[in-house]
Image (cartoon, rainbow, N blue to C red):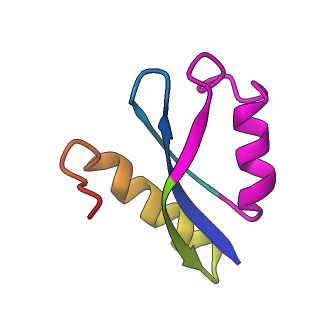
């Protein structure tokens, strides 16, 4: 199972979009400063997730959200 996720930085209120096969591990990596693109934006919290069986579907969805992230509204 793969998860597409959106994180929100409590520091600068910016979002990060990614996908993983282990959300808890990945969130720990983000919040411990191991991810270069988010290390200066911790703490981060998960604000949205979508689950996929196939990695390719998760990758496609991540790319789709990133291409429209200015318009992506979480309700």
On screen, 35 above or below 39?
Answer: below
Q: Quadrant of residue 2?
A: bottom right
Looking at the image, residue 29 sits to the left or right of residue 63; the answer is right
What is the quadrant of residue 54 in the picture? bottom right
Q: Residue at x 58, y 71 (%)?
A: 56
Specify whether 39 is left or right of 70. Answer: right
Q: Position of residue 75 (x, y in %)?
A: 26, 64
Can you give x and y, in whole percent of width and height, for residue 21 in the image? 74, 65
From the viewer's perspective, is 59 left or right of 70? right
Query: Which region shows up in magenta?
Result: 20-46
Q: Where 61 sits versus 38, above or below?
A: below
Q: Quadrant of the N terminus?
A: bottom right
55 displayed left or right of 65: right
Q: Position of residue 17 (x, y in %)?
A: 48, 46
Q: Residue furthest bottom?
A: 53
Q: Is residue 28 above or below residue 33?
A: below
| Coordinates of residue 62 in the picture (x, y in percent) | 46, 57
Labels in figure, total: 0
Q: 55 or 71, which is in the foreground?
A: 71
Q: Residue at x 35, y 58 (%)?
A: 64
Front position in the image: 18 or 64: 18
Residue at the image point whose x is 71% and y is 59% from the top = 23
């Amino acid at each position: 199972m793969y998860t597409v996720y959106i994180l929100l930085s409590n520091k600068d209120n910016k979002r990060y979009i990614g996908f993983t096969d282990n959300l808890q591990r990945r969130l720990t990596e983000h919040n411990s400063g191991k991810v270069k693109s988010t290390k200066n934006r911790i703490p981060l919290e998960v604000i949205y997730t979508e689950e996929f069986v196939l990695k390719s579907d998760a990758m496609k969805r991540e790319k789709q959200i990133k291409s429209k992230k200015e318009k992506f509204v979480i309700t």
